[in-house]
Image (cartoon, grey):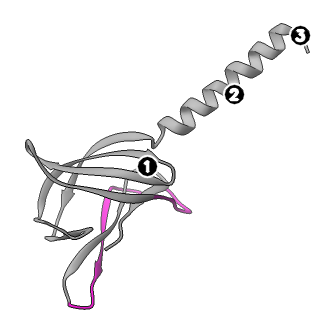
Amino acid sequence: MSQARFLRYFVLALALVVVGTEAFAKAAETLDIPFSASLSGTKVDAGRYRIDWKANSPEATVTLTKGKNVVATVEAKVVERDIKARRTAVVYKTKADGSEMISEIRFQGSSQALVFSE
């Protein structure tokens, strides 16, 4: 294999690795939570938050901030969905006691979601 061809393949492979890991490795977004609920055991009131996450495939550390206050730092799983989300959405689940918990957050334009446990 010629050196020029090797260099081309190397650059292409490097670009694919960077694009693939940067797509969901570390990110931040503004998120509107429409209803009060728990997030991995932490009570979260309705409102606008900043959500930051750092993925360590398939796990992610997620920090939810309101203003300058950290509301929760929790673990989640990064899950690949069949289709890209049309909009950012908070998915709720009703627990046995009737209370609501945030089970998943989907992000507009992404087929990946953050999935939380109780």
Residue 38 in percent (x, y) is at 20, 71
Mark 3–mark 2 distance (CA, rounded to whole Å)? 17 Å
Residue 2, labelled with which disc? 3
Q: Which region of the structure is painted magenta?
A: 78-97
Residue nearer the viewer, 43 or 80: 43
Whether residues under marks 3 and 2 lie with C-beta atoms below 8 angstroms apart, the answer is no
Whether residues under marks 3 and 1 lie with C-beta atoms below 8 angstroms apart, the answer is no
- The quarter of the picture where residue 24 lies is top left
Q: Which quadrant of the rendered structure holds the N terminus?
A: top right
Residue 109, labelled with which disc? 1
Mark 2–mark 1 distance (CA, rounded to whole Å)? 24 Å
Residue 111 appears left or right of 7: left
Q: Secondary structure at mark 2?
A: helix
Q: Residues within 10 Å of mark 3 (few under 14, many from 20)?
A: few
Residue picked out by circle 2: 13
Please determine whether, in this image, residue 71 is positioned above or below residue 39.
above
Amino acid type of disc 3? Ser
Q: Secondary structure at mark 1?
A: loop
Q: Residues within 10 Å of mark 2 (few under 14, many from 20)?
A: few
